[in-house]
Amino acid sequence: MRFSLISEQEHPLRPTGKACGAGILLPTNSTKAIFSTFLVTGIPGLETVHIWISIPFCTMFFITLAGNVTIMTVIRRERTLRVPMYLFLAMLAASDLALSLFTFPTMLGIFWLDARELTFSACFTQMFFIHTFQDFESAIILAMAFDRYVAISHPLHYSSILTNSVISRIGLAIVVRTLTVQVPLPFLLRRLCFCHSNVLSHSYCLHPDIIKLSCSSTRINSIFGLFVVLSTMGLDFLLILFSYILILKTVLNIASFGGRLKALNTCISHICAVILFFTPMICLSILHRFGPKLPSHIYVTLANMHFLIPPVMNPIVYVVKTKQIRDKILKLFIKKGPESQVTFIT
């Protein structure tokens, strides 16, 4: 563990106090240490069995890598899958893969090597990419909801509405929106000093978790962080609900019961993705801001569910529920051998 104490004697030209950031001073009689690293946490209370806990997490990481890479490969190779629904699915798989690459390795490092220490730069970088791909995933799920609405409400105009050009513009809009709100976060954190503690409550760096450790004013960070959540995932969730209200309205106008079931069945995979992504996030946000003080492992479990479960389960759900994807994967891995040939010598 490293920390620094900057005293008046070391820098006599500075104003009286301990400097821990640009323009931020602590009283010289303060006994607080100014930390320069963070310590991430495993699963509280289960430190003695971390090596055993790592087995299911390692399995989940392998499933995540294999599942999402397989989906992206199949969609890339098969021309028949280059339609809006599967292009959005490929984007979701890429986002899930990237999110898992910035969460699982840190956790496995804690379980296997007790590697808990992260520099500020490493922590802020990890935080930026975790929240960036979190927002990517939220926006992609919203785009998939729009795709389902167009497919069910305007089936005859589906291909003319969701052209490749439109999908490209949607993808660009997702990137621009996400970077616009996420890029300022690391810079706002660099103006803070951290002297209360340097122990984070999760196995990776998250913005709400980091600002809790600051001993300087975090009002700007808190307000901007809340704005980011509400303007991205909060807005996305409301628009997804609105999309399904319109979808349900269209489905109820279908005359036959079989037709209604067929229309709703095309949304099952997407509904599962919505539930897997948003339910733990909503519960965690409510508990952090309005809920009673709960044991730390409750928050850790909900955070792990939000960041780790969707990348694992989304490929499984889409493979199980989507026949086209399932068939193409079988075609990719189970190739027919060459037919036996008999040669007659005359």
Image (tube, grey):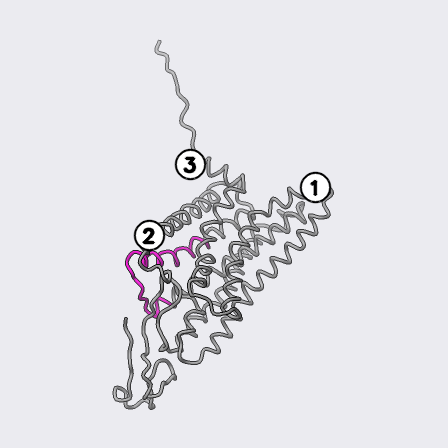
Please tell me how crowded label 3 is: few (under 14), some (14-19), or many (20+) other residues with Cα within 10 Å. Answer: few
Q: Which quadrant of the rendered structure holds the C terminus?
A: top left
> Which amino acid, by three-letter code, is at mark 2?
Trp
Q: Which quadrant of the rendered structure holds the N terminus?
A: bottom left
Residue 257 circle label: 1
Q: Position of residue 22 (x, y in %)?
A: 38, 81
Viewer-side residue, 50 vs 344: 50
Asked if marks 1 and 3 touch (Cβ < 8 Å), the reply is no
Work out whether 209 lies above or below 152: below
Residue depicted at 39% across the width and 19% down the height:
341
Q: Position of residue 186 (x, y in %)?
A: 42, 71
> Which amino acid, by three-letter code, is at mark 1?
Phe
Left or right: 289 as drawn, with respect to 64: right
The secondary structure type at the circle numbered 2 is: helix
Residue depicted at 38% across the width and 66% down the height:
125
Residue depicted at 51% across the width and 45% down the height:
318
Label 2 belongs to which residue?
52
Gap between marks 2 and 3 measured at Cα: 32 Å
Viewer-side residue, 173 vs 40: 40
Label 3 belongs to which residue?
333
Work out whether 217 lies above or below 82: below
